[in-house]
Amino acid sequence: MWQLTTVSLAAQIGVLPLSLYYFHQFPSLFILSNLIIVPVLGLILIGGILIITLALFNSLPQYLAEFFGEIISLMNNFVSWISKQEDFLFTEISLSLEFMLVVYLSIVFSVLFLLNRKPRILTYALLSIILLQGLVMLKEHQKENKNEFIVFHKSRNTIIGQRNGANFKINHDLDSTSISKENAIVSYKVNQNLKLNAVKNIPNVFAFRNQKVLVVDSLGVYNLSNFKNQIILLKQSPKINLERLIKKLAPKQIIADGSNYKSYVNDWQSIAKA
């Protein structure tokens, strides 16, 4: 029991930074699953060799094969049960590449010090921990001082994000229950370690810093005389004369999101280039 526990802890510590970096989640039931699965796997491995050997010589009793299959089924059912305990699975944990490397550096020097107890290795371990703390403070500072206006690409829909420090607001036209599970939103939110505030409406005009963004939807309305040299966002394939819009508003940038027909976007791109 003690060996299984220590091996599970050592293995989990070794793969935890990689797991958090790639999958952004931590399974808290790993010790329970390893205590049961590892011994059963040993029995299955030995039994499997025996079953295959008997089967090759046509000497495999039916009851033995059924018993072996029942053991595998029980293990699979247990693994399935563990995977469904979502209350014990911590998800959406943000970990950057730099943070992962520094964590591994701290783990390596800490383990080396426990094995050798040399003052020089202890110094390296403490320096790596200080570096880790400094990286945390730097990431928090960057998060609090970052501002972004994002047009996410979503086929047949419009998703617009506004980032002001740690505040992340989404305007969208999707179903309210599905927006929090949208891959692009989840990836950005987890990567930047933000909390989501979703609003199911898209205003005609956005203001971001000293910049305005005019949203032109399927109605094709853009009669604003004081909206020159700004940004235009085209959504839901508006039937407009883009040359006339450019002459009237003289936009500095035109954005077509994923809700538009591709043929429309190609035509708009040719007109804008000309």
Image (tube, grey):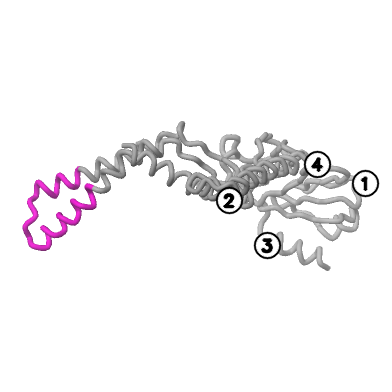
* Disc 1 + disc 4, Cβ < 8 Å: no
Q: Upstream in the sequence, badge 2 or badge 4? A: 2
Q: How crowded is mark 2: few (under 14 residues within 10 Å), some or many (20 or more)?
A: some
Q: Residues within 10 Å of mark 3 (few under 14, many from 20)?
A: few
Q: What residue type is labelled 1?
A: Ser
Residue 206 disc label: 4
Relative height, residue 274 to residue 175 (above, below): below
Residue 263 disc label: 3
* Camera-side mark, 2 or 1: 2
Q: Upstream in the sequence, badge 1 or badge 3? A: 1
The one of 117 and 190 positioned closer to us in this rendering: 117
The one of 41 and 236 positioned closer to us in this rendering: 41
* Disc 2 + disc 1, Cβ < 8 Å: no
- Left or right relative to 266: residue 176: left
Which SS class for mark 2?
A: helix
Residue that label 1 marks = 225
Give the distance between the C-alpha atoms of the residues marked 2 and 4, in whole angstroms: 45 Å
